[in-house]
Image: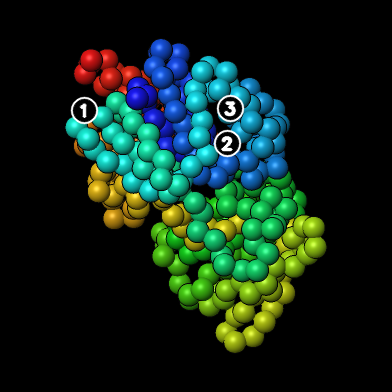
Amino acid sequence: MYDLIIVGGGPAGLTAAVYARRAGKSVLVVEKNTFGGQITWSPRVENFPGFVSVSGAELGDLMTNQAMEQGAEVELEEVTAIRDDGDHKTVLCVSGAEFEAKAVILAVGAKPRPLGVAREEELVGSGVNYCAVCDGAFYAGLPVAVVGGGNSALQDAMLLSETCSKVYLIHRRDSFRGEQALADALRQKANVEFVLNASVAELLGDDALTGLVVEQNGERRTLAVEGVFVAVGHMPQNGAFENLVALDPRGYADSGEDCVTAAPGVFVAGDCRRKNVRQLTTAVADGAVAALAAVHYIDSNL
């Protein structure tokens, strides 16, 4: 039996592993896809302390290697459920494997909701983006598009309008769901154009994005852009654990900054929990907080 099992091998989970190991606890990190998490999609990361510029893949490798050098064990498995067995938790995997621990941290993240357009995944990092705060600076002086109608899309468009030559804001309806004040402010921007009643039908370009084809009011239109920022929401990956932890109406774990849940011995960290800011730095902060909370729980129940 492990002291701690961490479900999710992204920045939050790997940071939690480092902190728990430094506290002398045995740790297993279970990840279903790629150790390092979604940051590995980013060709360049320039907003993480200590690195002027580093590829997301390299940063993910460094975090994974650090956790393993500290003594954390890793398994590439998809977790389907966690069973509460009283004094311990049993982590069940799709392969049939089972792992036991005194405490569990859920660090399963939240996936950006995709557009669902052909070649979208292929062009991630080569024009297709999901975080304007992370990647907007790479498009300074260039034309871009933002897709979405909520506050996130409006805020992304506002941010990008400060540095990009042109920002097309594409929304499938004729009005925005986001705050009216934000929409009004964007209307005053000379380099922002609203493309309403429209949806992205096609991504153009071979190795990198060179434009979008949008369908608007029954007609097709080509927009020459070098980047598109998709802001149509996120999908937290908490469905398998809804019997264990309370979820808010959007599916995020209903936990505050202490990363504690109502289920004894179960903690959450990173983008899968209810929070306002989802960035690499806030993910690693959550990892540290959740790990120390888990260590305290384990030591208090010896």
Residue 87 is labelled as 1
Q: Is residue 120 visible?
A: yes
Please tell me which residue lies in front, 106 or 286: 106
Amino acid on which disc 2 is placed: Gly
Amino acid on which disc 1 is placed: Asp
Quarter of the rendering occupied by the N terminus: top left
Q: Label 3, label 2: how many angstroms apart (C-alpha)?
A: 7 Å
At horizontal 61% and vertical 56% (from top left) the residue drawn is 229
Could you tell me which secondary element the residue under label 3 belongs to?
helix
Judge the density around disc 3: few (<14), some (14-19), many (≥20) Cα neighbours within 10 Å.
many
| Count of marks, rendered view | 3
Q: Label 1, label 3: how many angstroms apart (C-alpha)?
A: 31 Å
At horizontal 39% and vertical 30% (from top left) the residue drawn is 5
Reading the chain from its start, which is encountered first: label 1 or label 3? Answer: 3
Name the residue carrying label 2.
36
Please tell me which residue lies in front, 301 or 227: 301
